[in-house]
Image: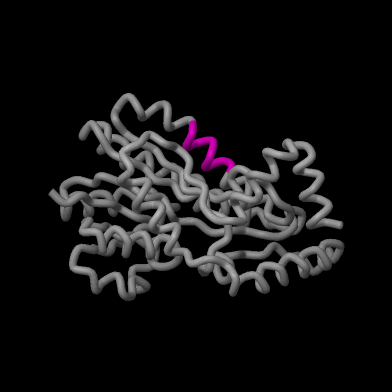
């Protein structure tokens, strides 16, 4: 019997590629997104159904679950992919930006997880794949809100791993470095305040760095392939790091130690 997977934030980036990867391997896919009109080429897959789902809206989460179960009867895996980044100096951030960052990346992920956990428990099996980031295990300057949200995802997921394992529910974390997706460009919100200019030079340098490296970033299809491997490798492995920059950062932190790593990050990015 074909297995079924639900993916949030599937209209672009990693989410869309994950949908295509699983669909191409014969899975039934519930591709969810905030704006259903942006489903695009996903509607061409005969084994993909698209659904409206705003992870920040409780009614939307419940409604999507109800319709998906009517169509498929059972879900085997939920991929919590929906997310975005607020970058820039924390001092320049607004309360709305702080709320939105955590509403999507953390509370939204929790809401979807809580909605589907009973379904997995009652079926005595299932899996959550949470798309995190190397920023969830390492910090870097001018990204405090995004980094904080991903550290929260890491802590939440690791703790939940213990809770759900007795019910044969698996939990996986995908931790990408930089990949060539719209996250690097249109999905980033930059904090700003014209009345405060002390961060301008560092912000300009950071934005230039991100723009300059965009063309040299690896193909995000590798993240989708890793998600498929994580879903089918039959292990209880929790973390899956991917990307040469992510591996370099982790190796550097381990070799230097946490304190020296923080000093090195400051010297490289802020001096």
On the image, the x and y values in percent for residue 242 come to 51, 52
Give the residue displayed 42% in from the left and 27% down from the top: 162
Q: Residue at x 41, y 53 (%)?
A: 226
Q: Quadrant of residue 115?
A: top left
Q: Is residue 30 magenta?
A: no
x 74%, y 53%: residue: 141
Which residue is located at x 46 percent, y 44 percent?
173
Along the horizontal axis of the image, is 249 left or right of 105? right
Q: In the image, is residue 153 part of the stretch drawn in magenta?
A: yes
Q: Position of residue 134 (x, y in %)?
A: 58, 49
Q: Is residue 187 above or below residue 55?
A: below
Q: 83 left or right of 87?
A: left
Q: Nearer the viewer, residue 79 or 33?
A: 79
Residue 71 shows in the view: yes
Residue 189 vs 2, above or below: the answer is below
Quarter of the image with the C terminus in it: bottom right
Magenta stretch: dominant secondary structure: helix
Q: Is residue 195 visible?
A: no
Which residues fall within the magenta stretch? 151-158
């Amino acid at each position: 019997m074909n297995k079924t997977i639900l993916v949030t934030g599937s209209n672009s980036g990693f989410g869309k590629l994950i949908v295509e990867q699983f669909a191409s391997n014969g899975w039934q896919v519930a591709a969810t997104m905030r704006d259903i009109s942006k489903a695009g080429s996903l509607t061409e897959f005969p084994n993909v159904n698209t659904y409206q789902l705003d992870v920040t809206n409780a009614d939307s989460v419940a409604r999507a679950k109800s319709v998906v179960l009517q169509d498929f009867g059972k879900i085997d895996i939920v991929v919590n992919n929906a997310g975005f980044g607020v970058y820039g100096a924390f001092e320049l951030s607004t309360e709305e930006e702080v709320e939105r960052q955590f509403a999507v990346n953390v509370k939204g992920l929790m809401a979807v997880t809580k909605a589907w956990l009973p379904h997995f428990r009652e079926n005595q099996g299932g899996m959550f794949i949470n798309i995190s980031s190397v920023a969830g295990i390492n910090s870097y300057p001018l990204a405090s809100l995004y980094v904080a949200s991903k550290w929260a995802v890491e802590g939440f997921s690791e703790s939940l791993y213990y809770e759900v394992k007795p019910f044969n529910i698996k939990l996986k974390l995908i931790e990408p470095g930089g990949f060539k997706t719209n996250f690097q460009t249109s999905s980033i919100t930059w904090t700003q305040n014209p009345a405060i200019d002390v961060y301008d030079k560092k912000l300009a340098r950071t934005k230039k760095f991100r723009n300059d490296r965009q063309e040299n970033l690896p193909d995000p299809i590798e993240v989708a392939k890793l998600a498929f491997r994580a879903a089918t490798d039959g292990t209880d492995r929790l973390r899956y790091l991917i990307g040469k920059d992510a591996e370099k950062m982790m190796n550097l932190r381990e070799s230097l130690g946490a304190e020296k790593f923080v000093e090195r990050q400051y010297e490289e990015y802020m001096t």
